[in-house]
Every structure is written in C-alpha cells, then in structure tokens.
Image: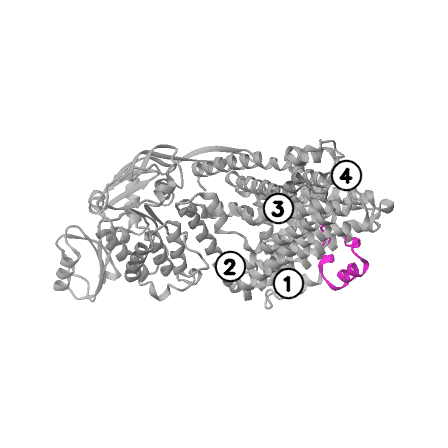
Amino acid sequence: MGELRAYAALLGGKARSMASYRTSFAIELLSNLGSTVLDVVTVFVLYRATARVGGFTLAESLLMTGLTAAGFVLADLVVGNIDDLKRYVRAGTLDTVLIRPLRVLPQLIFMDLPLRKLLRLAFGIFVYVAALVVNHVHWTPTRLTLAVVAPIGAAVFFGAIFVLTASLAFWWVESGEMGAAFTYGGRDFTSYPITIYSDWFRGVFAYALGFGLVSYQPALALLDRADPLGLPAWAGYAAPLVSVPAVAIAALVWRIGIRHYRSTGS
Amino acid sequence: MIRMQDLRKDFTVRVKAGRLRREKRTVPAVDGVSLTIEPGEMVGYIGPNGAGKSTTLKMLTGVLAPTSGEVSVFGLTPVPQRTRLALRIGVVFGQRSQLWWDLPLRESFRLLRHIYRVPAAEHEARLRRCRDLLDLDAFLDTPVRQLSLGQRMRGELTAALLHGPGVLFLDEPTIGLDVVSKQAVRSFLAELGATGDVTLVLTTHDLADIERLCHRLVVIDHGRVVHDGTIDALHARYGSRRSLVVDLDRPLASGFALPGATLVAAEAEGHRVTFALDSASAGEAVAALVAAASVRDLSVVEPDIEDVVARLYASA
Amino acid sequence: MGGIYASVLTISPGRPFRASVTTFGALVWSGFRRYATYRQATLAGSFTNIVFGFLRCYVLLAVAAGATGSRPGGYDGAQLATFVWVGQGLLTVVGIWGPPDLSDRIRTGDVASDLLRPVPPVTAYLAADLGRFGHALLTRMVGPVIVGAIFFTLTTPTRWQTIPLFAISTLLAAIGSFGCRFLINATAYWLHDARGPLVLWTLGSGVLCGLYFPLRLLPEWLAVTLWVATPFPGLL
C-alpha cells in the first residue's frame, strides 16, 4: 500500500508541475487530441477515393482504426513516455531514479505520465464505440467479452512494444527515433486491414512481430468475417492473448537492460 | 557499517583502431578498493577527475553493480537490495537534482515524504530542523527552477535527509557554489556530523571541505587508494605546507630568519616574500614578522589539493 | 535565394561582404559537422523513415487499386509510390520536425549567449540549419529513395528541368520550414516552453504538408485553400 501511495504522490507531483505551464498544457491537450482525430480523418480522406481498401469498407476499416486508436492511446498514455529513457540514460537522470526506494519502471512511468494525452484517449474510445455501432455487430456474450478485452489487449501489447523499444537505449543511446518505427509504425500498421501489405512485409509485422493479432483479427471476429488470409475464425477470439508473451518478453528485456546499465554505467 | 573488499569496476570503452575498426578495451575505473567505514565517521574521498570517486559512490548506493569484489552498507548488498538500502541512505549528487524542477521546494519535500514513507510527525521534525539550520524559509515556496544554485543545494541536502538516513553520500556537494553558500553547506554538514547519528562520505575537489569536515581522508588515483588517514598525516607524509605571503614596506633585513618557517620566494625587489610554514603556526609566524618588519599586507595560502595529489602520483 | 543574401549582409555591416560570406559559411559548416558526428542516429533515423515509407506506400497503393481508374486524385500507382518515398527522404532534409533547439535554449536561459555573439541570431540559426540540411541531403535522402526504388516502381522525371527545379524548391522549402520552426520555437519566450505549439506544429505540418496523403485527395475547396493560404504545401 505504501508503495502505491508513493506512486500516487509521484503522479500528483507531475500534475502540479503541469499546472505551472497552463497555456502550454492546454495547447498540448488539444493538439494531442488533434493528432488522433487526424489519424481517423486520414482514413476518411483515403476512402473518398475508393469504396474498398484491401477488400474492406470504410465502416469495417474504421473498426480496426478505432480499436487501434483506443488501445494505442491507452498504452501511450500509461507507458509512452518511457521513450525518454534514452534521454535519462544520457543525462544521468536514471541515477537519481536508482537511489530512490522504488522500482525503476513504475517510477519512470509515474514521474512523467503524459496527462496531456487524456482527451485523446476519450476520442479513441469514442471512435471504437462508434465503429462498433455503425457495423451492426451481431452481439453474443463471447463477442461482447471480446469487444471489451480486445482494446485492453491492444493497449497491453503496445505497452510492451513501448517498453521493448525504449530498452534499446540501455545498449544503444543513439538509437534516436528507431523505436518509433515499431510503436507509431505499429499503430499505423494496425490501423488498416493487413490485406493491403505485401506478403513479406505482412509476414514480418503481422505474424513475426504479432501486430496482425492486435486489431485485424479481433475486428474480423467482431464483424463475423472469414479471414481472407486464411487464419481460422477462432484466431480472432484468441488474438488478445498475444499480449501475454509480449509482456513477458518486454519484462525480461527490461530487466536485462537495467542490469546492463548497471554493469556499464552511463 | 560500510565495507568494501577488493572492489573493482571495469568499463569497456570502444577506441578507434584504424579508419573504421573499433576495438573494445577494458578500463578499470575502480581497481581493488578495500575500505571500512565505522558509524559516525566523516570521510572525505578525493582524487583527480576520473580517479573513480563517483564510480565508488555509485557502487555504494546501488546505481552500479561491481565487476568483482564485495560491498556492503548496513550489511546490505547494494545491487540486489537497492530499494531496502535506499530507505536507509541519503544521496546528494552535486551535479544532478532530485528535486522537482517546476514545483516549490515544499512540494518536493512533501513528495519525498510519500516516496520514503516517512510518518508525518517525523517528517515535520526533520524538516523543521533543516529549515532552521539551512535558512530555507525564505524560498520554501519558490519553484526549484527559480532557485540559485546555493539555495538549490540547501534544498538537495534537506531532501536527502528527510527520511533520516544513517549514511549520507555526497558527490561534490559544494561544486559551483559561492563562498557564502559553501560556508552554509559546510557548517550544516559539520553540525550534522557532530551529532554522530549520521556517517558522512563525501567526494570533493575542494580541500577546504575536507579540512572543515573530515577527520579521515581517502585519496584515490587510477582506481586505487593511495592514502587513507588524517589530513595532517597526508601533509606530513608529502611535506606539503601552508605558506605565508607578505607584502612589506621595506625589504627584510638580510639574514632575517622566521623560526619554524622557510623563506621560499622573494619578489618585487624584496617587497613581497613567501614563507613556507614548517612547524610554526600561522599566528606565531605573523607575530614574529610584525615584530621584526613593517607589514603592509599578508595572506595565508593553503597547500593546494592538486599539489598534494600531484605529489601522490609521483610517489604512487 | 534572395533571402539568404539579404541576411548575409547584416552579419557585419561594417566589414566587407566577403567576410560576411565567410562567417556564414563557417556557421553552415559547423551545423553540418554537428550532425555528421551522430552517425548512428542518422542510421536509426533512416531505418524509421523507411519503415514508415513501407506503411504509407502500401496504404496509398491499396487505395489506388480500389479507386476508379486506379488514379486517386489523378496520380497513378508509380506516382504515389514516388510521392511517398521521396516524401520520406525529404522529411528530414526539409526538417519539418527539426530539433527544438531554440525553445530548449530559451527555457534554460542559454539563449542569452546567442545574443552575445556578433552575428544576428536568426542568421546564425539559419546557417546552422542549412548545415543540417546539407548533411541530411547527403545522408537521409538516399536511403528511403533507394529502398523505395528496389521494392516499388517509381516514376523517373522525364524532363531534365525537373531535377534542378526540384533542388531549388527543396532548398526553398528548407528555408521556409526553418522560418516556421523558428517562429514556433520563439513562442517559448512567452510560454517558457514551446512543447504545446511544437506538438501542434508537428501534427498540423504532417498532415497539411501532405505527408500522410496527397492533398489532392481532399475536397477541392479545402486543397485549394491550403495551397494558397498556408505555407504547408510548399514545404514538402
């Protein structure tokens, strides 16, 4: 309990720090909302030119976009700022984190929780719910469960990707924006039906890295559509489980990373 | 209380070998340090840049894991037991802040109370004491980013002590401070050490910190301990002396001798002379000079830490 | 180009023109050198540009495949692919999302030392940015374009004039983007930190410059307004 209160205090500190930059914070809040809005608008714009992309209608695509938006933004809100790890490693801020009686990852998360992304989360959920409505999903108890679990699974999966790509900084401080290829890149990948990608690219992102199970498969299950790429129908229901190995790998790599930092210094 | 046994830390660095090739090379930052520090001691840890001071401190606080050797603080091994140890030690990095940049000092302290899970009454009592001793009241409600370096350092000291640690590690706590702030920090630490409740380990480049605060001086160079003892023992061992620089109205009479001191330089046609103080105290030497000559101005120059350390290299 | 020379003249009004050019050149070179030291970051950045190139290219090609006559907005597949990959290459060259140096320096107060130098700060920052531009042109442009050419059919310019025109327009875009970023960063003088405006900029510029999709896919009234009234389309 004491530990939880400590994290709550860290979060409170962050909130009060933000309050001293009110104008900037307000602009950030809005522009962050704007970025998710624009992602969705992009989908609408592209569908102005065509009725189907990769064999899917606008409404169907929107379900994947919405599922991704809700899950990704939740992950980005909670652990997205772990991306700054490379800055902490370079500036030596990680040392001040290591002298406190708390665990490193939660400390980094709560020290700098990007509250400016809150509105964005609301919008992401709105798009997801709206997409569920316009698609006239044929509701069953299993589908209802899936509809709730899928965005959470997506969030956990993206969270794991954030931690994994951030851990890169323990070995490679100059990794720059490389992590973005998989975090933001992953989000872009899962925002569209994966049928649009070429075989090898889909093989890497969708199946080897697991992004295909984040939004595409659950969306198929919710829409009651067979996978044109040939995976069985139950795959959609099992898909959120992909976040379990993802978290396990992320946790392992993080641990090894911290150990590496301690044995090499900054 | 603090024990280091044959402690080593190697860093691998990549050095250029030819146009594109890079070679890995192992550099020992701390090369077999063994030290024991008893409760209540005040230990100054000095050495040139890159000697391994900060690396040692980081191993004692659990930030870095040793390559080999043993280290324990309060019987805890810092790396696997970092969080338990953190509750019992205080750390001040002179070049890094653990305060919240955008928040008033008071808020930072309040947050630290939660992080270290300190009961409110204890927190209040300790904060009260620091406020009195460090004169914090004037800027307790100022955001940290607006504090002067001296004010911030006083805040950092308080932050490191609010959970009542048994050891305080200070990495260059007076770096960059003005004279007044240095004094404030030193007298605070002196008072803290005098209670005997807190063991102090500090690294510094400023010999005055050591002279004012530390009974024991550990000199480290190239990762090895080259001296461990009192500051007097160090000066005695390397013959470093304080000196007295005197400006005179008229040059000294030839053959003038100052008991317990040696004339080492005469400049400006004998209007400025420098004596090295061998056995005489500054007071005795000044008294003897004033009695024998017309003194316009004088100053006592401390032996330079860099000089002492330089001599240590030569003999190491 | 006129813009550069006009500001060069103000570097040292009392000294001959040549000295000013030399100063400016030295500043450009130092900007170039600064980025040349981050070789690994350049590599990492190119990798990211390339991954996003694939993502955007596949999406646009899928749109083209479904569009009537396979020509959304009047572009064919090869033109769209070229648009994406050259865009990915240009992204860092033009530097729409360039580093927020100025606002950081304002926040920390380091900007004071810039004001002490005998070179007007705007000129100095422009010179450094042109150095960055030169470095990016040599390093960051090539990767995405080559990868794009390997995996997709790209169009090659049919008229020789296209190449010098492209080069000039790139340089002008870089200067334009510098101007915009300088203004955004300068909001830090009032707001302490320019993060809010910067995010707004990153976002607005990305879409409005046509990074996500060609602007012609927008309804015509909107596209025309953007072309005429905002600096964005001119940047990419």
Which chain is disc 2 placed on?
Answer: A
Question: Would residue B302 be visible to someone looking at this image?
Answer: no
How far apart are the alpha carbons under marks 3 and 1? 47 Å
Give the residues drawn in magenta, as a range: C210-236
How far apart are the alpha carbons under marks 4 and 2? 46 Å
Instruction: Tell me residue B106's x, y (percent).
Output: 38, 60
Q: Residue at x 81, y 49 (%)?
A: A49
Q: Residue furthest bottom?
A: C14
Residue that mark 3 sits on: A72
Q: Amino acid at mark 3?
A: Phe
Residue that mark 4 sits on: C152
How far apart are the alpha carbons under marks 2 and 3? 23 Å
Secondary-structure class at tag 2: helix
Q: Amino acid at mark 4?
A: Phe
Image side of residue C219 versus residue B118, left or right: right
Q: Amino acid at mark 1?
A: Val
